[in-house]
Image (tube, rainbow, N blue to C red):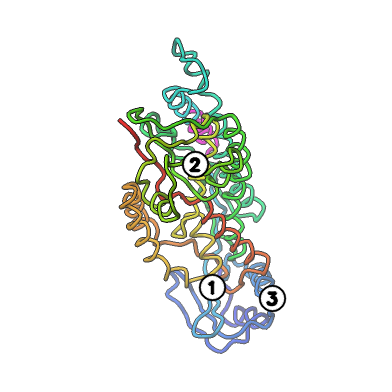
Amino acid sequence: MFPEPEVLSAILARYLSIQEVTLGDGASWVARYRGRLWDEDSEKAFDALTEALRPYGWMPLFREENGLHAVYIVPAQPPGNTGRPLINLVLFLLTLISVLITAASMGNPYAAPPRNASEALAQGWPFTLSLLAILLAHEFGHYLMSRYHKTAATLPYFIPLPLLSPLGTMGAVIQMRQTPKNRRVLFDIGIAGPLAGLIVAIPVLIWGLMHSQVRPLEIGQGMMMEGNSLLYLLLKYWVFGEWLPTPPQQVGVFYWIRYFFTGSPLPVGGRDVLIHPVAFAGWAGLLVTALNLLPAGTLDGGHILYATLGKRARRLYPLVLALTFLLGFGWAGWWVWTILLFWLGRAYAEPLDQITPLDGKRYWLALAALIVFVLVFIPVPMVVYGG
């Protein structure tokens, strides 16, 4: 049911000083009203107008165009389909098995060599539970914040990948099944996951480091070294009292800059921490957080960036692609991410109300998210060492 044009204009006039009316084609929108909102509290105006249009089965979209407020009248959002929880449960159980098998194949340098498959699996539980706890915290941070803001979203879909991934999984995702109301809601949903994941990952990493040991790196021992982020370097220094990996000779700041961004030269003959599997899970939590905070598309960082800058966020997209491409010269995996971002990173989650800005508290949280990204970003996630 669509109200008579006079009735619709009367409804809009309660909230907007109307300067221009344009009729649409009826497919994507049926009418556009441009002017200035009477109420400076645009969030309050959006809620009130939404309720006024609800009986007719329509809803508003708030936009800014040429210095004016634009209100588009579109069909109301249908109730979001949040999926079938049984599928989420099955994928989680498959991922648990996948991560456990991968952890068993990695072994535990702080335990006796397993004599059989059951002992190997038993040694894989600490890593498995630690990693899944971090991923669950991250995804349920998004999910619970979506529920809080009454934005329909699915439960997490976990992605098993046994043996083909060093973690046994490609992580997990939730899907928003409704468009967020405004940039504040989009921001809250986007930032909740990384913060919740870090709350679990950092204590897990510290516990794992405290149960790890620093040992010499010997030629030919053949291993993969985990890459460094600023936070990981600081936590290793806090636990062990030295910057790790430590080269065998005195080096300057330029060595550290080169090693941080390229993973070379390898500190052969130096010292590094042989991390406990739980520490490896905590380190993986930092990596997952960093990847999700990349400021593009529908990644968490893309949500935060768009919520903070609005459509200006799109201007940074080419810079993100250029950064990941250049980082690929240090770790080829970034070229895969460049392709993924080129394919998936151009579309942002645009909220219904794009007039309402973030408040001061959220701008400070956006700055905190940027600092977190700098601290947890790992330019070279994995370095092959030795023979």
Q: Residue 244 carries which label?
A: 2
Q: Residues within 10 Å of mark 1 (few under 14, many from 20)?
A: many
Q: Report the side of 22 relative to 141 (left or right).
A: left
Asked if labels 2 and 1 touch by Cβ distance under 8 angstroms, the answer is no
Amino acid identity at mark 2: Leu
Marker disc for residue 151: none
Q: How many marks?
A: 3
Find out whether residue 187 is within the magenta segment. no
Q: Where is residue 216 in the image (x, y as percent from the top left)?
A: 45, 31
- Whole-percent x and y of residue 17? 63, 87
Q: Nearer the viewer, residue 262 or 25?
A: 262
Question: Of callouts 1 and 3, which one flags the residue occurring earlier in the amino acid sequence?
Answer: 3
Upstream in the sequence, badge 3 or badge 2? Answer: 3
Magenta stretch contains residue 91: yes
Q: Is residue 38 left or right of residue 84?
A: right
| Amino acid carrying mark 1 in the image | Ile
- Secondary structure that dominates the magenta span: helix
How crowded pointer 3 is (Cα within 10 Å; few <14, some 14-19, many 20+) is rated as: few
Q: In this view, does 169 lie above or below 381?
A: above
* CA separation in Å, label 1 and label 2: 59 Å
- Indicate the position of residue 116 as horizontal and vertical percent values: 44, 11
Q: Mark 1 points at which residue?
A: 73
Q: In which quarter of the image is the N terminus?
A: bottom right
Mark 2 element type:
loop
Query: Mark 2 packing: few (<14 Cα in 10 Å), some, or many (20+)?
Result: many
The part of the chain drawn in magenta is 83-94
Dividing the picture into quadrants, the one containing residue 267 is top left
Per the image, the residue denoted by label 3 is 41
In what element is the residue under mark 1?
Answer: strand
- The amino acid on which the numbered mark 3 sits, given as a three-letter code, is Asp
Q: Along the line of sight, which residue is nearer the eye, 13 or 200?
A: 200
